[in-house]
Each structure stands twice: as structure tokens, then as C-alpha cells.
Amino acid sequence: MNFLEEVILKEGQALSDKVLKVDSFLNHQVDPDVMRKVGEEFARRFKGTGITKILTIESSGIAPAVMAGLELGVKVIFARKRKSLTQNEDLLTANVYSFTKEEKNEISVSKKWLTAGENVLIIDDFLAHGEAALGLAHLVEAAGANVAGFGIVIEKSFQSGREKLLKKGYRVESLARVASLSNGSITFTRQTEEARI
Amino acid sequence: MNFLEEVILKEGQALSDKVLKVDSFLNHQVDPDVMRKVGEEFARRFKGTGITKILTIESSGIAPAVMAGLELGVKVIFARKRKSLTQNEDLLTANVYSFTKEEKNEISVSKKWLTAGENVLIIDDFLAHGEAALGLAHLVEAAGANVAGFGIVIEKSFQSGREKLLKKGYRVESLARVASLSNGSITFTRQTEEARI
């Protein structure tokens, strides 16, 4: 079990067989030490792949993305779910359905900070159905930039996001892969595999 | 001039005499190195004051708050502008009018992560009219916790926020204090004072 899985087992709560609550260190309260380790691990996995920028989405992606950016020495841009009045420049947009919030968001980034030729690592807190991930990849490709891969803090491996991203040829690095949340208990894919052996 | 003022002069844009755009390193694109220095400076100023937690608000407060939390060795909690479906617990709420977005937001934090007896440093990207700052202070005090002070990345000193906070007896530490944005040019309070001498 890696450090993140240990934190999840200790602090996470399976609210249902689909919802994992990790608001003690990631989604509401943020543990800077855990985020730093998460950032270091993303950096380790993507080192040497020529990342020039990190793209994430507000709000829970920001802390892990900034820590990864610090390690990789690149800037981070976060897509917005709502436009701000000072965002008056040209925007790249994508439509993303959020299963958690049960609504469709138009996510956007400024064309100024995501440009052709960049090699972009996409970081997010969760990978579930892959809606946000595909929306972020759309933004990168609409800018003429390359998706170097996805760095995911927690993957719900029982949902279809990972499969969708792999099918499109993207590299997916998830630091914790949750196999199941059934009966209020959290199990990870590796544990599941070990249990099979 | 301090490091942050140098970054602001180099990268900031006075869009009007009230709006300062700093989306290259703080509000949209985030520069992790600048954020780390900002966090270190907040930690230096509040070291020894017994901070037990940092409170900020999504989204642009998260990066500087997490960097400060890393330095001070405390956790960060970010108030939400919209509720998430997995936030099913008791919430503390405050109403905040945003002049930038021209709308009123109900901001909220979970009672679970902001509790009586904590000594809370409030960090935000901007201090303008003080609406968000006062809302965050309200959340802290509604929890029975103490406001140790405010760590502000950029203060618009020509607006009333700082004055409102000082009048209530709060300590305010702003890393850059903008005296004016008139005629497309950015000046800081210290520069203004020097010019007077």
C-alpha cells in the first residue's frame, strides 16, 4: 500500500458504493504535506517526458497541481467552471457534466495561457466517469497542444473514466486506484489483485 | 520593492483604475515558485503566533494558502462558493457580495474542519472592499475560533477593505499594497510614500 492509500484508508469515508469522501485532506480541508508528497510522486512519474505546463480544474485540483508544478518547474493553469469579469480575452471552452453536482458546466481557459506546442500534464483530484478529464483534454487539443498524460490523485476504477482515457491513447497515472466502495469499505485495485492470487 | 511587487509590475495589468489583472501567476495561471515564496513570507510574518489552521476561499486563495500551510505545518480549509453533493454535514455559512462577479455568494465551510479553540490565519489572493475577508472572519467566529489575522497576497489599498478589518481589530499582513491603478500604471503604497518624502 502506498502513502496515499494509507491516508485514504485512515481518513476517507465510503458514503455509498459510489461516493468516497476525502474532505479531510483533499476536497475541503487540504493537507499540505500529503499534497506535497502527491506532487512529488506525479513529478517522479512524468519526469523526463518534457512537460511544459500543467492543466487542472478548480477547485480541488489546484493544490496537487501546484505541488506537482513546483517539483517539475512548470506553471499551472486551472480551468474555470464560471467566468470571471476580468477574463475578457479569448477563451477555449468545453462542456462537462458533473455527476457529483448533477449539472453541466462550461469549463474554460484563456487562450493566452494554453498555446500550441505545449506538452501538458493534466492533473485532477478524482477520475470517475472521465467527463472532466475528457473536457480538459479537449481544451489542450483545441489549443494545438499535446496531452502528455493524466495525473490523478484518486481513481474510482469501478467507473469508466480510466477505460475511456486509455482507449483514446492517453497515459493515465493514478496514485490511488479504488476498486470498490461496497459495504462502507474501501479497497484498492492492488489489494483486489493480491486477494486473487 | 519586494519580490511580489516586482512580479506584479512585470506581469500585472491595470485593466482600469480599479481592476488589476494578475492571471499569469495567481488567478488563472499559477506560478508555483511565486506561490512558494508568498507562502514562506506569510509563514515568516505569522510564525510564533500559534496558528493552528488556515482558512481561505476557492479558487485563487488555495495555492498561496496551501504553500503557507506547508511552511507553518498546519492544514488548510477552503470555503466553498457552491455546495457539493458530498457536503452533507452541518455547515457554517456567510453571505458575501463579489464586486468582481457582481453577485452574492453564500460561502460555506463544514463545522467538522473549523472548530472552537482554533487559531485561524485567513489567507486570500486579494483584499479590495473586504467583503470576502469579513465573510471568512464571520465563519471563524461562528465556529467559536479566533481570527489570528489576515494574510493577503495583493491589497488594493485605495479600496476600503484594509480599513474595515483594522477597525475590527484584526491584524492585516498584505504582501503587496497597491496604492493606485490610475492611467494604466501600477503604484504601491511604499512607492507613494517615498514619492511624498
Image: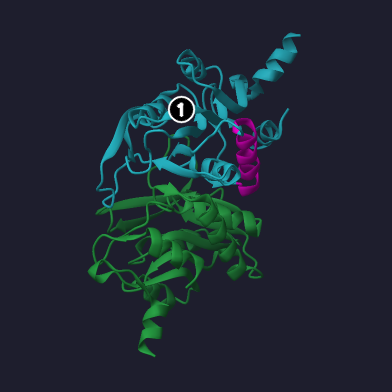
Chain colours: A cyan, B green
Q: Position of residue A130 (x, y in %)?
A: 45, 23
Residue at point 65% right, 47% down? A33
A41 falls in the magenta region:
yes
**Residue drawn where x is 57% and y is 30% of the image:** A49
- Point out the residue furthest to the bottom here: B197
Residue found 41% across the figure and 84% down from its top: B194
Q: Secondary structure at mark 1?
A: strand
Q: Is A185 or B22 nearer to us in this picture?
A: B22
- Chain under label 1? A
Question: Taking A22 as reference, is B143 above or below it?
Answer: below
The one of B134 and A131 positioned closer to us in this rendering: A131
Q: Nearer the viewer, residue B140 or A128?
A: A128
- The image quadrant that residue A17 belongs to is top right
Residues drawn in magenta: A31-46
Q: Main secondary structure of the magenta part?
A: helix
Q: Quadrant of residue B188?
A: bottom left
Count of numbered labels shown in the rendering = 1
B57 on left or right of A157: left
Q: In the drawing, does residue A180 fall left or right of residue B183? A: right
- Residue located farthest toward the right when viewing the structure as drawn: A197
Residue B32 vs residue A97: left or right?
A: right
Task: Inspect this view and state whether residue B80 appears.
Answer: no
Residue underneath mark 1: A147
- What type is the residue that disc 1 sits on? Val
Q: Tell whether A75 sits left or right of A135.
A: right
What x and y, as percent, mark residue B113? 56, 50
Q: Which x, y percent locates residue A76?
A: 47, 43
